Amino acid sequence: MKKINFTDCYDEMMSYVEYDEWAKLLSSKIKKETEGINLLEIGSGTGEISIRLHDLGYVIKGIDISLEMVNISSTKYKNIEFLNESMLNLKDKSKYDAVISVFDTINYLQSLDELNIAFTNIYNSIKNNGVFIFDVLNRKMIDSMFSEGIFADERENMSIIWKHSYYEDLKLDEIETIFYVKEKDNLFRRISEKYMKMIFSNNQILEMAKNVGFHFISKEINVEIAGPRIIYAFKRVD
């Protein structure tokens, strides 16, 4: 029997996400700046954003640092190319009309140096007049979500607990996600996943984007579909 892991639980964990609305929001932001249809999604997960943008008429490629995620998305959506790559080491030298990265993927970078590398790589992957759209969490959102250091969510076939710790010396947030997945005979399997995130300030993001050559377009806090998250849009103008 295959051992259940975090990626097997991911779609269930994200089942509340309004993917259709996310895709429409991203598409509207892209169309304001470019008529191009060639997209790259960074942190494509199990492919749910990519497939919806594909269905809206875009030619899209997805990359994810998790090989297991790439295997799942490639199995689910065979008409889209998904690759096991990191934004810190983009092997694909193609140029895109837009690069998108949602669900706080940028927050998985763990230093300003990594943010600089990622922004530089993304800038070099975008055509002139192309756009980069992404979202992030800020400190206020994290503190609100984990006001007591823990957040729990009860689902039909699983319970999910998020535990949060902040390491002042590293300036990093550790989040542990613990799943209790219902199996046969009402027994539960425990699965856990730990990951580190860095919360970048607005000034750090704006300054880094400017330093690599991006032009600022917009910033918004979307509480209706984003959870809330801050959504940025930048443009490459040569």
Image: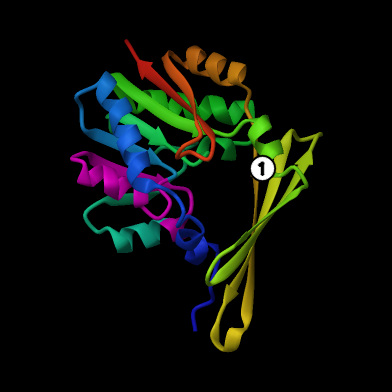
Q: Nearer the viewer, residue 5 or 12?
A: 12
What element does badge 1 sit on?
helix
Q: Is residue 238 left or right of residue 4?
A: left
Residue at position x 58%, y 89% in the image: 185
Q: Check disc 1 and report the residue beneath it.
A: 145
Q: Quadrant of residue 32?
A: top left
In the rendered image, which quarter contains the C terminus?
Answer: top left
- The picture places residue 51, in percent across and down from the top left corner, at 28, 50
User: Of 105 and 231, which appears nearest the observer?
Assistant: 231
Above or below for 152 versus 25: below
Q: Nearer the viewer, residue 89 or 75?
A: 75
What residue lies at 32% left-to-right and 59% top-to-bottom?
74
**Outermost residue, bottom side:** 185
Query: What's the residue type where badge 1 is placed?
Result: Met
At x 53% / y 40%, what residue is drawn? 227
Residue 93 makes an appearance in the image: no
Give the image location of residue 66, x and y in percent: 48, 54
Place residue 161 in its image quadrant.
bottom right
Image quadrant where residue 233 sits: top left
Q: Is 176 covered by the magenta stretch?
A: no
